[in-house]
Amino acid sequence: LIAGDLFDQPQPSRRLVNTVAELFASIPDTAIFIAAGNHDPAFIDSPYRTRSWPLNVNCFTDAITSINLSEMPVSVYGAGFPSTAAPRSLLPADFTTGTPGRLNLLVMHGELVSNTQASDYNPVAIDRLAQSGLHYAAFGHRHEASELLSAGFCQAAYSGCPLGRGFDETGTKSVRFIEFNDKEGTSDWQIKSEKFKTGGRIFSEILLDATEAETNQALADRILEQLR
């Protein structure tokens, strides 16, 4: 589940899109679901609309729709940003899954809010999730991964980003692995969730007392000592 902003612009370079598509094609047994975000909205010329993606890739670009997996009782719902902003919720007020007995998942870019809060980036009220019939909602937009949030029977979380790209994305990054178990065939889905740290560079902000470093070399030595 990729909850938006896979690309950082509406029209990424063709070479980059080809690379991503090739990587997705290299794991054909993994079903991939992508929701367009505010940085890569589903404009008419978006690669989400114009690109021929591998068969295992599904792109949500419009109002909320669902895809049923044939090999297991799982339905994946999603909606995409139509523009760089979405002040009205992409999750309709009367939304319900309508698929009892199935594991119902949602992937979407947006902000979880209370009933009185507003947002320009797809405000989704927690109470709405609680009444939706969903079991898990994967949200993008915030760059910091969250812990699981309970909304009735639905669990939700922000994925964060798997690799920091600047000093607005500090610290260790992660992806979330979710496991659902059908308790004794009753469709009472039990969730296990774990964040896995990802490798690569880490951006860190460190405060250093440099009041007694009266030369550039003394300052450099102190910085190197702190880094070690």
Image (spheres, rainbow, N blue to C red):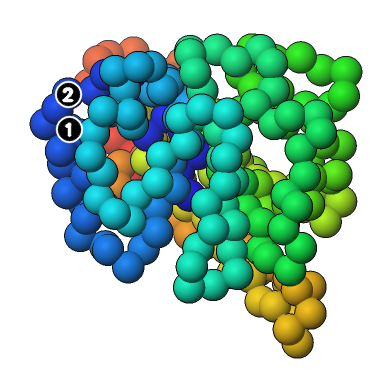
Q: Position of residue 119 (x, y in %)?
A: 69, 15
Q: Quadrant of residue 223?
A: top left
The residue sitting at 54% across, 72% down in the picture is 72
* Vertical relation: 35 (above or below) 211: below
Please give left or right for residue 113 compared with residue 25 in the image. right
Q: Residues within 10 Å of mark 2 (few under 14, many from 20)?
A: few
Q: Dot 1: few (<14), some (14–19), or many (≥20) neighbours within 10 Å?
A: few
Q: Which mark is residue 32?
A: none
Q: Position of residue 6 (x, y in %)?
A: 37, 34
Q: Nearer the viewer, residue 207 or 194?
A: 194
The residue labelled by disc 2 is 13
Q: Secondary structure at mark 2?
A: loop
* Residue annotated with mark 1: 16
* Image point (84%, 45%), residue name: 130
Which quarter of the figure has residue 157?
A: top right
Q: Nearer the viewer, residue 170 or 196?
A: 196
Outermost residue to the bottom: 184
Query: In the displayed structure, does residue 9 sit left or right of residue 87?
Result: left
Q: What is the three-letter code of the residue carrying label 2?
A: Ser
Q: Eyeballing the image, is 186 above or below 43?
A: below
The amino acid type, in three-letter code, at marker 1 is: Leu
